[in-house]
Image (cartoon, rainbow, N blue to C red):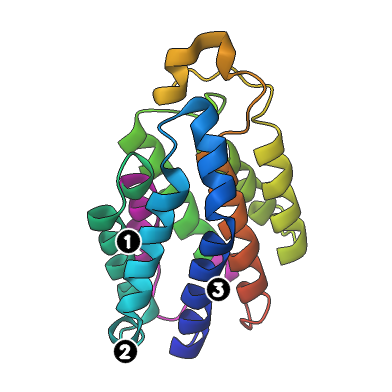
Amino acid sequence: MTSDDFRSLVVAMAAAIEANADRLTELDSAIGDGDHGANMKRGFQAVLGELDQLATKPVPEALKAAGMKLVMTVGGASGPLVGTLLMTLGKELPADFDRQAFVMAYEKAVDAVAARGKSHAGQKTMLDVLYPILDAMREGADPDEVAARARAAADATVPMLATRGRASFLGERSIGHMDPGAASVALLAGVVARTLQTHQGA
């Protein structure tokens, strides 16, 4: 992945979040604080604002810096969790990585998110999309299939009972709503999948 690939990825991620911010906020209004879309938009706009500087770094270092920016900028739980994902991914990736190295680094990154959130799959959180993405990549799924699995995993959070995070306070009233963190991760997974499709060897 070149610096141009990274630049394209950040631009595409920020654009996707901005285009879907209202939907993410609507989802969060049903079972959370109602600020997920605005928070994610602010975070990715902040990363976008430092893109010229980030693009001069090796991709692993750029990922770590972008993750730190999200942690410092995005409110609520989503900033620290998505930031942890990117920071750990950057920490674990070698400078020149192939698909296998990416999958191994991603696994450690998802486990880091689980540890930071003190949660696991099945609790109606973003982990319910992050782990299916990992499974798909382990199975050698192509980028389109990874993105499709991510969307399906987000849809699968609708009938779940939330047992972690603010949505858990609603008890059974959390059933019937998509988790906003799962929705945003699925959205970003689609962007990343399309970018990786153009990255030779990933």
Q: Amino acid at mark 1?
A: Gly
- Magenta residue span: 80-100
Residues packed near mark 1 inside 10 Å, few (<14), some (14 to 19) or many (20 plus): many
Residue depth check, mark 3 versus mark 1: number of the one nearer the observer:
3
On screen, residue 16 versus residue 2, left or right, reads right
Q: Amino acid at mark 2?
A: Thr
Q: Nearer the viewer, residue 17 or 122?
A: 17
Residue that mark 2 sits on: 56
**Rendered location of residue 153, percent (x, y):** 68, 39
Task: Please indicate, yes or no, whether residue 71 appears anywhere in the rendered image.
Answer: yes
Residue that mark 1 sits on: 67
* The C terminus lies in quadrant: bottom right
Task: Please indicate, yes or no, whether residue 125 appears anywhere in the rendered image.
Answer: no
Residue that mark 3 sits on: 12
Q: Residue 89 sits in which quadrant?
A: bottom left
**Lower sequence index among marks 3 and 1:** 3
On screen, residue 151 versus residue 196, left or right, reads right
Q: Nearer the viewer, residue 170 or 120?
A: 170
Q: Residue at x 57, y 37 (%)?
A: 27
The verdict on residue 54 being magenta is: no
Q: Describe the element under mark 2 as helix, strand or loop.
A: loop
Q: Describe the element under mark 1 as helix, strand or loop.
A: helix
**Rendered location of residue 134, percent (x, y):** 59, 49
State whether the magenta stretch is mostly helix, strand or loop.
Answer: helix
* Count of numbered badges drawn on the protein: 3
Q: Amino acid at mark 3?
A: Ala
